Image: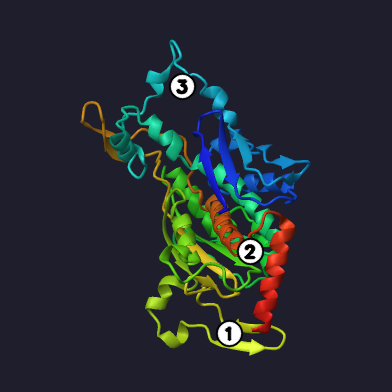
Amino acid sequence: MSLRYLTAGETHGPQLTAIIEGLPSNLELDFEELNFQLQRRQKGHGRGRRMQIETDTAQIVGGVRHGRTTGAPVAVVVENKDWKHWTSVMNVEPVEGSDEAKRRVFRPRPGHADLNGGLKYNLKDLRNVLERSSARETAARVAVGAIARQLLAKFGIKVAGHVVSIGEVTAATPNLPIDELIAVTEESSVRVADKEAEQKMIELIDRMKAEGDTIGGVVECIVSGLPVGLGSHVQWDRKLDGRIAQAVVSINAFKGVEVGIGFEAARIPGSKVHDEILHTADKGFHRASNRAGGFEGGMTTGEPIVVRGVMKPIPTLYKPLASVDIDTKEAFTAQVERSDACAVPAASVVMEHVVTWEVAKAFLEKFGGDSIEEIQANLDNYLSQVEAY
């Protein structure tokens, strides 16, 4: 069975819910680690007041018994602490005398889903759009990805993320082992290993906030410990780099993605783009470099996956842009909803987990079984086949 999930819930509703199908049995879950990943998403210089309200934790309400998956669908709930302030506005049932009219959104914000969603679903209160299109939904996606992360960890696969740039401030490229990169960036409020760039990023974010503006940036995800051959060249939708690219661009406010050296490959000759193939007794087939970012022909090469995503500035501004009142059709300034000045460090964590999910899905497609033990046997058999090639 293919690994898949669905999420449900609104940003100011009672909870976010996710259901995961296709996890094997006997995966031992570390609940502290799961919640640690959720809390990482809430950190980062530039986050707004919402992160002072929420303390995200995941409650597993199905598919796990005595700390281990059973093979049944896993149901995960992330409570919205802010729900208590919205019980009238966001109640599922009709509420007499509610302040719904006061909280109605009728001036769409440029850069958000507000107007498109209102037109598509014929909704005259744009809150019905923004509540679901909000980046709050990524808390559920991180919870799902954090479980997939624990699955991959059982087989020696590690995932790291870091910030490449915020605005025009670019961090030096880290040349660190993945465990060290994880440790160093976790100590940084903007998730970089470059202290000089860190300070400049903080100053830029503070300036944007003081001006009522926002700023975006570029984040990178690295996955190490992968076997060769995840994904496939035989159909377009089985190419793993393509699936990862789709997942990255699906993150709220992400507008671009590149793999390996990405767009740089358009500016340099082929001799400086492609990774030469080597073979040694201890490493077998491997590459002299990793400009391809761990992929050839839509399949993993055995080198680390390296993917970058571009996040635009958050469109909710405290100096709102011009918009149009959907009732009167008159020009107005867009309504202001609580927002962050910069969410790039948090977006780095989100990207880690959507990439993790796609890798885990491809991993189970290749080595899948109904239990962890069966998957391990399938993987061992394949690695022996590759070694003997």
- Crowding near pointer 2: few (<14 within 10 Å), some, many (20+)? some
Q: Quadrant of the C terminus?
A: bottom right
The residue singled out by tag 1 in the image is 288
Position in image of residue 347 (x %, y %)? 52, 52
Q: Secondary structure at mark 1?
A: loop
First reached walking from the N terminus: tag 2 or tag 3 = 3
Q: Is residue 336 above or below residue 253?
A: above
Would residue 216 appear left or right of 151 to someone viewing this image? left
Would residue 122 appear left or right of 166 to someone viewing this image? left
> What amino acid type should be assigned to the residue bearing mark 3?
Val
User: Please, which residue is most extreme toward the right here?
Assistant: 66
First reached walking from the N terminus: tag 3 or tag 1 = 3
First reached walking from the N terminus: tag 1 or tag 2 = 1
The disc label shown at residue 367, or none: 2
Q: Is residue 194 above or below residue 6?
A: below
Q: Are marks 2 and 3 in contact (CB under 8 Å)?
A: no
Measured in 3D between alpha carbons, the distance from the residue under mark 3 to the one under mark 1, in whole angstroms, is 59 Å
> What amino acid type should be assigned to the residue bearing mark 1?
Ala
Measured in 3D between alpha carbons, the distance from the residue under mark 1 to the one under mark 2, in whole angstroms, is 27 Å
Task: Kindly report which numbered mark, 1 or 2, lies closer to the viewer in this rendering.
Answer: 2
Would residue 272 appear left or right of 335 to someone viewing this image? right
Q: Looking at the picture, tell me which residue is in the foreground, 68 or 131.
A: 68
Q: Is residue 379 visible?
A: yes
Q: Secondary structure at mark 3?
A: loop
> What amino acid type should be assigned to the residue bearing mark 2?
Phe
Q: Looking at the picture, tell me which residue is in the foreground, 285 or 384.
A: 384
The residue singled out by tag 3 in the image is 89
Position in image of residue 235 (x %, y %)? 43, 67
Q: Secondary structure at mark 2?
A: helix
User: Please, which residue is most extreme toward the left here?
Assistant: 329
